[in-house]
Image (cartoon, rainbow, N blue to C red):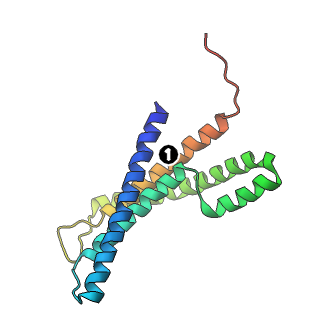
C-alpha cells in the first residue's frame, strides 16, 4: 500500500516540477522576446514565471528527497563507495538521520509561518485580490513531503537487513 502511495506521490511531484519548469522556460522566452525584440513588456509574465519557478523548486525539492539525491553529498558518497564500500550504508543512514534532524528542527518555524500566512493573507501588489500567501503554503507542503520521504527512506534503509520470518 505504501509503495503504491509513494509511486503516486512521486508521479505528481514529477509532473508538477516538470510542467512548471517547461511553463517557466516558455514564459521566460516570451518575456525576453517581447522585451528585447518587440520592445513591449507584458505586465505579469515575469511574476507568473517566478511563481511557477518557485512551485517547480518546491516540487523538485520533495522529489529529490524521495529519490535520495543531494549533489554535494553524492560526490562524497561515490568517493566512499570506491575506497570503503562497507561503510557506505552506515554513511548513508547517518546522512539521512542528520538531514531529518535538521528538517525537523526547521519544521516548527515553517508551521508557525504557515499558520500566520493563513490568518493574515497577503495581497499581491498589482492585483489586490490575488493572495500571494500560497507560496508559503507550497513551501510548507514541500517540507512536510520532504519529512515524509526522509522518514520512509530511513525506515526502508534500517529495515533492509532485518531478516524476515515467513508467515505460515
Residue 80 location, quadrant: bottom right
Q: Is residue 37 left or right of residue 149?
A: left
Please state which of residues 2 and 75 is positioned toward the viewer in this rendering. Answer: 75
Q: Residue at x 66, y 53 (%)?
A: 95
Q: Give the x, y percent position of residue 135.
A: 34, 63
Residue 137 in the image: above or below residue 89: below
Residue 155 in the image: above or below residue 129: above
Q: Residue furthest front?
A: 37
Residue 119 location, quadrant: bottom left
Count of numbered circles on the image? 1
Q: Is residue 15 visible?
A: yes
Please state which of residues 99 and 30 is positioned toward the viewer in this rendering. Answer: 30
Q: Is residue 41 left or right of residue 69?
A: left
**Label 1: how many Cα within 10 Å (few below 14, some 14–19, many 20+):** some
Q: Give the x, y percent position of residue 8.
A: 41, 41
Q: Residue furthest right?
A: 83
Q: Residue at x 20, y 77 (%)?
A: 126
Please state which of residues 82 and 115 is positioned toward the viewer in this rendering. Answer: 82
Which residue is identified by label 1? 148
Give the SS element for disc 1.
helix
Residue 42 in the image: above or below residue 62: below
Please state which of residues 98 and 163 is positioned toward the viewer in this rendering. Answer: 163
Q: Is residue 111 visible?
A: no
Q: Give the x, y percent position of residue 17.
A: 40, 58
Residue 38 location, quadrant: bottom left
Q: Residue furthest top?
A: 168
Give the position of the C terminus as an image quadrant.
top right
Q: Residue at x 48, y 58 (%)?
A: 61
Q: Give the x, y percent position of residue 5.
A: 43, 37
Amino acid at each position: 500500500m505504501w509503495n503504491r502511495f509513494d509511486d503516486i506521490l512521486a508521479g505528481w511531484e514529477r509532473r508538477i516540477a516538470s510542467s512548471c519548469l517547461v511553463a517557466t522556460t516558455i514564459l521566460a522566452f516570451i518575456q525576453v522576446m517581447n522585451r528585447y525584440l518587440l520592445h513591449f513588456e507584458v505586465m505579469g509574465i515575469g511574476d507568473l514565471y517566478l511563481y511557477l519557478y518557485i512551485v517547480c523548486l518546491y516540487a523538485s525539492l520533495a522529489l529529490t528527497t524521495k529519490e535520495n539525491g543531494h549533489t554535494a553529498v553524492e560526490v562524497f558518497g561515490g568517493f566512499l563507495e570506491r575506497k570503503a564500500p562497507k561503510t557506505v550504508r552506515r554513511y548513508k543512514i547517518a546522512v539521512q538521520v542528520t538531514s531529518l534532524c535538521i528538517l525537523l528542527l526547521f519544521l516548527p518555524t515553517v508551521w508557525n509561518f504557515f499558520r500566520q500566512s493563513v490568518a493574515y493573507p497577503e495581497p499581491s501588489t498589482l492585483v489586490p485580490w490575488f493572495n500571494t500567501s500560497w507560496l508559503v503554503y507550497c513551501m510548507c507542503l514541500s517540507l512536510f513531503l520532504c519529512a515524509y520521504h526522509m522518514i520512509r527512506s530511513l525506515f526502508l534503509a534500517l529495515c533492509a537487513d532485518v531478516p524476515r520470518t515467513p508467515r505460515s
